Image (cartoon, grey):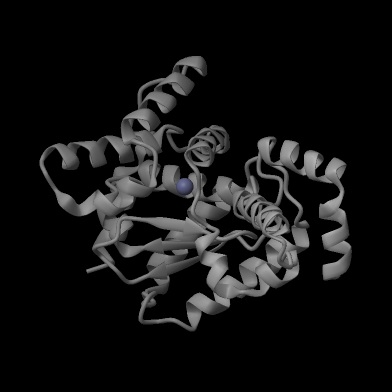
Amino acid sequence: MDGTAMRNKFFNPVYLLISLIGIACGANFYTIQQDRQLGDDIDREIKAAPKEYPPYNNEQVRSYVQNIVNTIVRSPEVKYKGTFAYKVTMINDDRTVNAFATPGGYIYVYTGLLRFCENEAMLAGVLAHEIAHAEERHGTEHMTRDNIASTGLSIALGSNPSEVAKIAASSANLLASLANSREDELEADTKGFTYLRSTSWWPGGIKLFFQKMLDQQKRGTAFFEAWLSTHPAPEDRVANMEKLMKENQTPAPTEDNLMTSNYRSMLRSMR
Ligand SMILES: [Zn+2]
């Protein structure tokens, strides 16, 4: 679609109304192929920026994490297996307790997250959450919203509206568009839980992650300040998980489904 077609389309008040309803309902104007393309582009950007994303070259650890992702992706609830990459890249940064996913399923895991987690179920909980962001296409959903908003704004201001393609092509916007809303975060926690129910891990692992985060916060570790400013309150996420587990009558975790000893041997290989 060229700029003119786009402009005419957006000048149509009926279309604009449909778009606004679409925003409220989580519309996505991108194709699955575009999600994949964006993922490829962002992955290339990240690989080309080793200062911001220092690579962690430990294939044993990477494939340990990749195997967990592969297992989660086999869940019948995961639609885009075989379509999205679902490829793990490790980032060497012990002070960052985080992971993120691009559209199209590239997953980046900081060494700080591995050191923070205490068992496989906890890590699997976070990974399932990241897979859910890719599956639910939260990245391109946001870009749809941002594009409609900026196009609407430029119509109001009488300037030339941007083309979707032009915005998508600017790599600076790509990573910024990955910031997820509070609703997206809770949805990803819920979806992640459903994926994990078909695996042998305890499906509530992400709750343990937030509980540990809350513990550390109470003890005054400033570690999570940046994280907490951009994410919903961990208390809300713990409550959401507890509600889900109650509805699904999820039993308490056991050593068999937390897999702590497996996890500890992986951590030993990180030293
Ligand atoms: Zn998230």
Can you see residue 1?
no
Task: Identify which residue, 18 or 125, lies in the foreground.
Answer: 18
Is 203 situated above or below 27? above
**Badge count:** 0
In this picture, residue 96 sits left or right of residue 79: left
Residue 50, image x and y in percent? 40, 82
Residue at x 74% of width, y 36% of height: 21
Which residue occupies the extreme front position in the image? 158
Residue 244, image x and y in percent? 48, 22
Task: Identify which residue, 221 or 157, lies in the foreground.
Answer: 157
Is 69 situated above or below 231? below
Residue 189, image x and y in percent? 48, 37
Quadrant of image for the C terminus = bottom left
In this picture, residue 253 sits left or right of residue 118: right
Res 246 quadrant in image: top left
Residue 59, image x and y in percent? 42, 73
Quadrant of image for the N terminus = bottom right
Residue at x 54% of width, y 32% of height: 197
Is 248 situated above or below 263? above
Residue at x 61% of width, y 51% of height: 142
Can you see residue 193?
yes
In this picture, residue 163 sits left or right of residue 270: right
Residue at x 51% of width, y 50% of height: 130
Task: Identify which residue, 35 or 261, lies in the foreground.
Answer: 35
